[in-house]
Image (cartoon, rainbow, N blue to C red):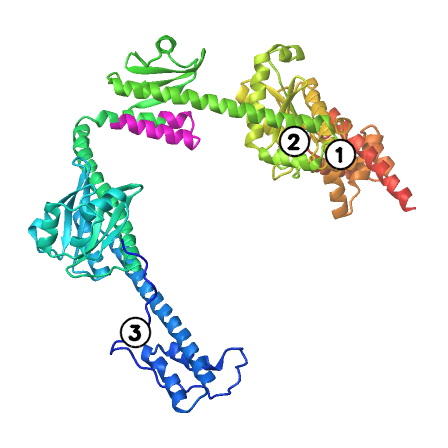
Amino acid sequence: MATEQPTPEPGPESANTPRAAPVPYAPEGTPPGEDGHDPAEAPFLGLLAAGAAAEEYERPVLRARAEGASAGRLAALERAKLRALRVRAELEDRRRREAELSALHATAHDLAGLRDLDAVLRAIVRRARSLLGTEVAYLTLHDRSAGDTYMRVTDGSVSARFQQLRLGMGEGLGGLVAQTARPYVTDDYFHDERFRHTRTIDSGVQDEGLVAILGVPLMLGSGVIGVLFAADRRARVFEHGQIALLAAHAAHAAVAIDTANLLAETRKTLTELEAANEIIRDRSAVIERASDVHDRLTELVLRGGGVQDVAGAVAEVLDGAVEFAEPGAAPAGALDRSRADGHAVRDGADWVAAVGAGGEVLGALVLRGHPALDPVDQRTLERAAMVTSLLLLARRTAGEAEQRVRGELLDDLLNAADRDPRLLRERAARVGADLDAPHVVLAARTDGPGGGDDDAHSHGADRGRLRSAAAHLAATRRGLAAIRDGGAVLLLPLGPDGDPAHAARETAARLGAALHLPVTVGASAPVPAPAARPAAVADAYAEAGRCREALRVLGRAGQGAAAADFGFLGLLLADTRDVHGFVHRTLGAVTEYDARRGTELLRTLGAYFACGMSPARTKEALHVHVNTVAQRLDRVSRLLGPDWQSPARALEIQLALRLHQLSSAVVGDTGA
């Protein structure tokens, strides 16, 4: 094996090396430069920078000697010359290594682009010969069955016997490399006794005329898969750098060989798979249809599809009409048989697959008008029924969890006025609610055929359905819902109109339609920001409850209303006691008409009620003609509506007149 060689002394350059221009030497006595360097080094630095030939480094010394420089000066120049030559040798060595690495990189790039094993092996051997500049290069591969290596590819070889050699482990230089997994080099093969010579191998090497041989192992992991050789037909010393270069090339080559082998195996496998696929393809029409159903159902589940989506997908695959039937709507006999048997069953021209979980029947998938159904399609319908049951259970679980979270948050708003607003906002954000927006509190209760409290409390099923319907409505409106005091309470964002009464009527209609029962709903005044003032939610719930009970007492069960809908009674029901709002709603049209026209309709209205609703006494109190009173009252009818003199309306108008007078008197006293 070659040993590391000492750095060669600089020798004469080739005739093609450019000669640098003469560099003047520093005169004797020149002081050191400002940078601290010896002035004697200056001419040699210039030669290094110019890439001058080695003989050029002698010129500064010869010139100084010719000019009679002192012995000290000549000694300094000699030292500087030797240092410069060592630097030059180092630079040359680095340039050589850079060129070798560049060539090695190009080799790796070329090998990476090859896919055929024979092409890869030929490229490896050809590039090895090129990298080291040898006359011959060759490669042997390990034969696991025979336990030896055999000649696989040669480049530059002329001997047929040599190209057919096989080397046992430890035989010849290649056998030694394969056995030890280490590079070996010989300057003279036939006089090297480090490895075992055999007549067969020596005869082949002699036929080829090889003298100097370098062999490096091809390694994959810790195993040797072959040996790469570079050889000359004359004596030659392979330096350490060349050994390392061939070893690096062998490392790239081993990876390329492994890749090519894997690709060859892959191609073989693909060919076998193609043949298998041809067989499968002849009998896979039904299986592909079942797979298509599986993929579609999986996609539906992953994207959050519903029961109708599953039915639609199965209908498309089975080429029929598929629908989901609730337990009460499915054929009872077929549903029971499917549930007991665990399979889809035929029901006339239809097929029924029960949808259930445990002992609970959730419904059925019914395939209409498809009496002929092969076993795979039957299994497809059964699989769809199973997926449907999973979807229903998942939706139920998710809905119950979200309903519980929304209910707990609303309970905290109603029960704990000292809750941290920041935490309330964070909890609301998790369920998509914005407690900084205006909301309305709604109190709802079912009214059965009896219409009484006992009837509502005696039907737990109705309360459960009310809970589910209220939770669904709250989820769709980004609000909250909970069960409280035998009914439901909802906290919903106000609509664009900002009208609590409209929200109450809409909620009563939607809950009633969902339950198929009358649902009475009372609404509170708007709550501007529930998170900022949690205590306002409890007050609003109390107001909504009073409105709901007022509706039931007034015989308006199944309707929705807010305090503003009850006229003067709303003043008692509402927490805000909005006197000005009541007066404006009741007499606003009259007061605005007086303000615009300068009339005295409001004064006439007050006198009319004060005189017992007698036009004759009214004209005397106002000192006007009776026709004037009649004309003014006719104008009031057009402004307030024809029923303004009915007992209920007359009571509200008189109360509004009295409150208007009181508020005007208070304002007058304050102004005074």
Residue 238 shown left or right of residue 392 in the figure: left
Q: Is residue 404 visible?
A: yes
Nearer to us: label 2 or label 1 = 2
Dot 2 corresponds to which residue?
A: 501
The reply to whether dot 2 and dot 1 touch (C-beta < 8 Å) is: no
| Nearest-to-viewer mark from 3 and 2 | 3
Marks 3 and 1 close (CB-CB < 8 Å): no
**Which residue is located at x 25 percent, y 44 percent?**
258
Residue 489 location in percent, x, y? 65, 24
Judging depth in this view, the residue of 255 and 92 nearest the camera is 92
Q: Main secondary structure of the magenta part?
A: helix
Q: Which residues are magenta?
A: 288-311
Dot 3 lies on which element? loop
Q: Which residue is mark 1?
A: 582
| Amino acid type, mark 2 | Ala
* Mark 1 residue element: helix
Few, some or many residues within 10 Å of mark 3 (<14, 14–19, 20+): few
Residue 308 sits inside the magenta stretch: yes
- What is the residue that sits farthest to the right in this orientation? 672
Residue density around tag 2, few if under 14, some if 14–19, many if 20 or more, within 10 Å: many
Going 60% across and 32% down the picture, which residue do you hit? 479
* Label 2 residue SS: helix
Q: Quadrant of residue 90?
A: bottom left
- The structure residue drawn at horizontal position 43% and vertical position 77%, both measured from the top left corner, is 79
Q: Residue at x 68, y 37 (%)?
A: 422
Closer-to-camera residue (203/589): 203
